[in-house]
Amino acid sequence: MAKLTQMISKKKEFVVDIDKEIYGKGLTDRKHANYEIYKKPSLEVTFCGKKFENPFILAAAPPTDDLDMVRRAFKMGWAGAVLKTTSIEGTKVDLAYPMMTGLEYNGQKLFGMGNIDLISEHHIDVVEKRVAALKKEFPKKIVIASMMGSKQSDWQTLPQRLTEAGADMIECSFSCPQGSMGEDPGKMLAQSIPASEKTARWVKESAGKTPVIIKITPQVTDIVAVAQALKHAGVDAIAASNSIPALMGVDIETFVPYPNLGGKSTYSGYTGPAIKPITLRTIAEIKRNVDIPISGTGGAMNWRDAVEFMAVGANIVQFCTAVMHYGFRIIDDLTSGFANYMAKMKFTSPEQIVGKALKNIVTHDELPRRKVRSKIDIEKCIRCDLCFVACRDGGHFAIELDEDRTPIVNEDRCVGCALCQRLCPIDCIEVK
């Protein structure tokens, strides 16, 4: 009995300590402390005038190309979904299989994913019924219909029909190789600024009061110029950004690139965590220069990634590869992890995070010049020699080994490049 009392006392101390860390309070009542710890902040956000129960939605992809799959996702807690891109009746959609391949790195599957998927096989007549069904069953969820056309009549007919079906928003794919209205044939629509602005204006005029989001590509010379043109066209938001054209690899015995379709292949759309740095830069450049809401998409795998997307300017975050890899259930980790982070940082709304990192992005000339050096925690060091080899052959030959293979930093040679810190497997190196 005495041991049980001691255990309860320790648990109470732990609860109060955690409460102090998160809320800055000292609560002595154990029941009250537990309540405060698990009292989550609101994750609700407003984007283009629409309320989302949390900032996390599904991107236009295979997970949103089936009505029952979207139903299941909504029931599990996703705030919204962008249905896979639809088109006008009669549009040829000739899919080829297998369509997926992955880049493995250091034993990690799908460090990057490549796909040769096209738009949905389901045309507007099917998708408009799905939109209506989802809004009837889930009135508080945000249903976003994605669409693309090949001529002016398509770009103006599709928004009207989707609006009449009840879509909360319309996302337009300007970042798939569907041509660009006669300019630079074969390239993405978003790679032509005049064509993007003209087409976006058609869609916005046709959509009426329904918010229009344009999904762009980072494969341009000036992403800011594209965003400015779209804002000038009157669109409500930008989805930044899409997959990146890539060749996923080559079988060095058959010399057939991946994926192998009967001895032939083609370029893939590259997604997953490998493209996250490119997406972060794209979002940041738009947010720093153009006053327009942003739906961040491309590389987010967890709640930490979502925080980073929002910190550089995204208002909401789309998920695709993470869902295809781990399933809809990741929404639990996203919402709980994000809520705990907000509580720890004392944020009362996700919108307080948006753009918070932008002030710290400067030009190279504006960077501070400080004298820094690597410091190794010898007690933690496992003598793997990685820092020594990297510095010897890729740095400044500033790390030496003593007779026990203990790494020693030569401060006269060390410039603080941080290469050793980045590759240390146990994080025992700091740059100070």
Image (cartoon, helix red, strand yellow):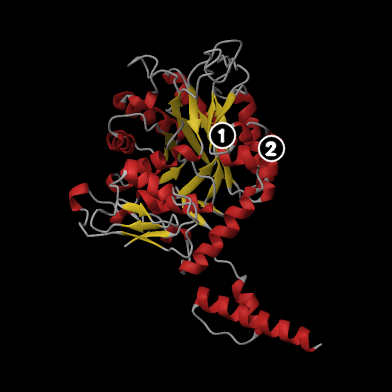
- In the image: residue 9, left or right of residue 346: right
Circle 1 residues within 10 Å: few <14, some 14–19, many ≥20: some
Spot occupied by residue 13 in the image (x, y as percentages of width and height): 62, 83
- Residue 314 visible, this orientation: no
- In the picture, residue 233 is in which quadrant? top left
Residue at the bottom extreme?
A: 2
Residue annotated with mark 1: 164
In the rendered image, the residue lying farthest to the front is 403
Quarter of the image for residue 96 reads top right
Can residue 29 be spotted in the picture? yes
Nearer the viewer's eye, disc 1 or disc 2?
2
Q: Which mark is residue 69?
A: 2
Residue 146 in the image, given as x and y percentages of width and height = 52, 32
199 relative to 399, above or below: above
**Viewer-nearest residue: 342 or 349:** 342
State the residue at coordinates (57%, 26%): 101
Q: Gap in Å between the C-alphas at discs 1 and 2?
A: 23 Å
Farthest residue, direction top:
263
Question: Which amino acid is tagged 1?
Answer: Glu
Foreground: 217 or 45?
A: 217
Residue 227, labelled with which disc? Answer: none
Q: Pick whichever, 221 or 174, lies toward us.
A: 221
Q: Position of residue 319 (x, y in %)?
A: 54, 42
Assign the C terminus to one quadrant of the image: bottom left
Q: Amino acid at mark 2?
A: Met
* Residue at image point 63% right, 31% down: 65
Residue 355: horizontal and vertical position, in percent?
36, 54
Q: Nearer the viewer, residue 351 or 220?
A: 220
